Image (cartoon, rainbow, N blue to C red):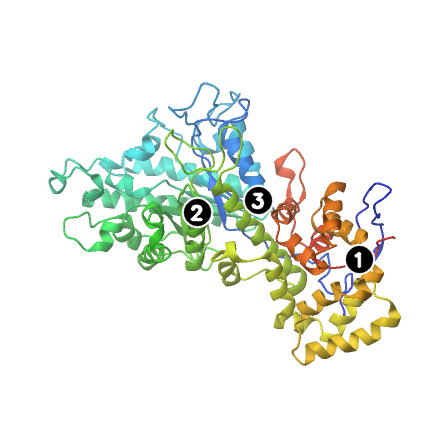
Amino acid sequence: MLQRCRFLLLVLTCTSTLPVLECGAVERLLTVSGDVEFPEYSTRIGGQGSTAIYTMDPEKAWVIQEAEYQLALGSDTFKFMLRPYKNKYAGTDVHTEEGPPHSEPVHSLVDRAKNVESFRKILDMPFRYTMIWAFPVAGLNNDQTGIYTGKAAGINLGDGYSKAEAKVEYRELYDFTRYLIEKYQNTGRSFLIGNWEGDWVLLADQEHLPQNKGKENKRAFEPSQEKIEAMRAWFANRQKAIEDARNSLPDAKGVHVYHYVEVNHFENAMDDIPDNGDARLVNAVLPNIKVDAVSYSAWNGTNQTKELPGRLHKHLQFIEDHAQFTGEWPFEKAVFVGEYGRKKGAETTKCINAAASWGCPFTLYWCIIPNYPTNNHYMVEKDGSLTESYMAHHEALAKIVCQRDVYRLFLGKNPTEKELNVLLANFQNTEVSSVLAAAINSPEFVARISDSDFVAALLVQLLVDQGESKQLLGTFLNKITTGELSRFQVLLELMDSDEFKTAVNDREFSAWICTRVLNNEDPASRESVLSSLSSTARSQVWKSALNSPGFGSAILKARFQNTQADYKDWIYENSTSDTVYQHFSVDFRGILK
């Protein structure tokens, strides 16, 4: 049976020489109802803000500007550090995360989240996944390199992890987790609390040990058993604080908080070379504790792009084989890429491909704005222009959202993790029109809509005269039945048919391409499309529109129900809205000549 639901067509104001698309109630004949709600869906790839050396707007804290660029990019994932930090390379016009002075005191992570304007705004921003480097505020020293030396937040793991230190950290993380759950319940959002590159913390302050004498590179250091035990206790305490907090609010719905450990340097442990730094987090700490997830700061795994994907896969698998997980993580894989960075767009693309083909639930690029002068892997130039890596992410994200919307419309579901991995593993060579074709030709869609109903619905949507429809229905149904044409090929042939050209003239078709498919109101663009129809088939013009960067941008803009000034009011679109329907459905009902 054909599924039916009513939707309102967009009113478009055009010049007198252009066709007007009229408001009119029509029925969706081939897609799911517009009121069907789908589960939350992650777009997987994103970036992070880190102590920027410049900003485009001196009135804003740098971390806010980086987050805003990330939203504009189309990502639903962002990582930042919940701690004030002034980059020594930054100019005087660059605000720290704190931005304007806060009026309330800051004695804890909760205070910082509530009382510091920029942090409060970041947490309100509509990222589905917000990743946070979080360390306790109490006893915070003024050493800005704390996270690099193991003395983060006044905790010196070099001399062990005392009960007093553990108590302070437990309380702050426990309270912060409860704060996030209570404030953001029913938003569908997730928060991931973790650390920065834990192997550097493990190896800090170990140069005095006998086994490290004469070793100039700390990458070859062997940590003491006492330091290993301190790291185990540290991560176990952080995990317990977050677990206990979320278990204390069993009735809270629509929000999640997870704990992750980040590892970064363990190749020595994989090489089995004696006295070369065998003990690392991955093999000396992770097997002895349970965590929700593990982040890999994957510079070692991705810098040799010629060795991808094999090199990264080997590293990710080594982590997975050694870690123990709580089972709370919602994705099939509990290991993700927390950092990587390449200058060239093609190399960034290879890294995204490699992470996806292993099954990474997240792949985070470092960084959005550079954090030191010689950093050549970032997304936004000082003048606001966008780098190759930004554009690579934009293309990938647009195709992720296109696949999601197509699957929701025609198959009534979100893509599986495997289906998304397949797309991301080769997104640069995958066209949106091919994604749509695969869905329309799929057994799942055939099970939803019979061949005869499919062809009949197309004839109605293409405004073919009823007197001609019966003959065309028989002709194209026979071509599908005999295997001469796929369903998508039938759609293309009908789009190029004389019957459709009689129903919808070229000027009307060009208006539809621009306003419905591309959300482009520019009359000059319509004239350009109209001109191309003199030498190019309509079906090809339509496919070219679907595969264009402009289409990707239009799709990404439609991912929120509203985009008011207050970020906390932004709501993700979890249904197939009228706008999404218009993007992907070849439906001309409502056009006036």
Q: Residue at x 74, y 63 (%)?
A: 495
Mark 2 Cα within 10 Å, few/some/many (few <14, many 20+)? many
Image location of residue 173, percent across then percent down:
43, 39
> Which of the marked residues, 1 or 2, is nearer the chain's N terminus?
2
> Which of the marked residues, 1 or 3, is nearer the chain's N terminus?
3
Q: CA distance from mark 1 to mark 3?
A: 29 Å
> In the rendered image of this protein, does residue 545 appear above or below residue 167?
below
Image location of residue 494, percent across then percent down:
75, 66
95 or 223: which is nearer to us? Answer: 95
Mark 3 Cα within 10 Å, few/some/many (few <14, many 20+)? many
Residue 243 makes an appearance in the image: no
Label 1 SS: loop
509 or 394: which is nearer to us? Answer: 509
Q: CA distance from mark 2 to mark 3?
A: 17 Å
Amino acid type at image mark 1 = Phe
Q: Is residue 555 left or right of residue 97?
A: right
> Which of the marked residues, 2 or 3, is nearer the chain's N terminus?
3
Label 2 SS: helix
Residue 215 makes an appearance in the image: yes
Image location of residue 451, percent across then percent down:
72, 75
Label 3 SS: loop
Q: CA distance from mark 1 to mark 2?
A: 40 Å
> In the rendered image of this protein, does residue 344 appear above or below residue 336?
above
> In the rendered image of this protein, does residue 43 appear above or below residue 107?
below
The N terminus: image quadrant: bottom right
User: Mark 1 = which residue?
Assistant: 588
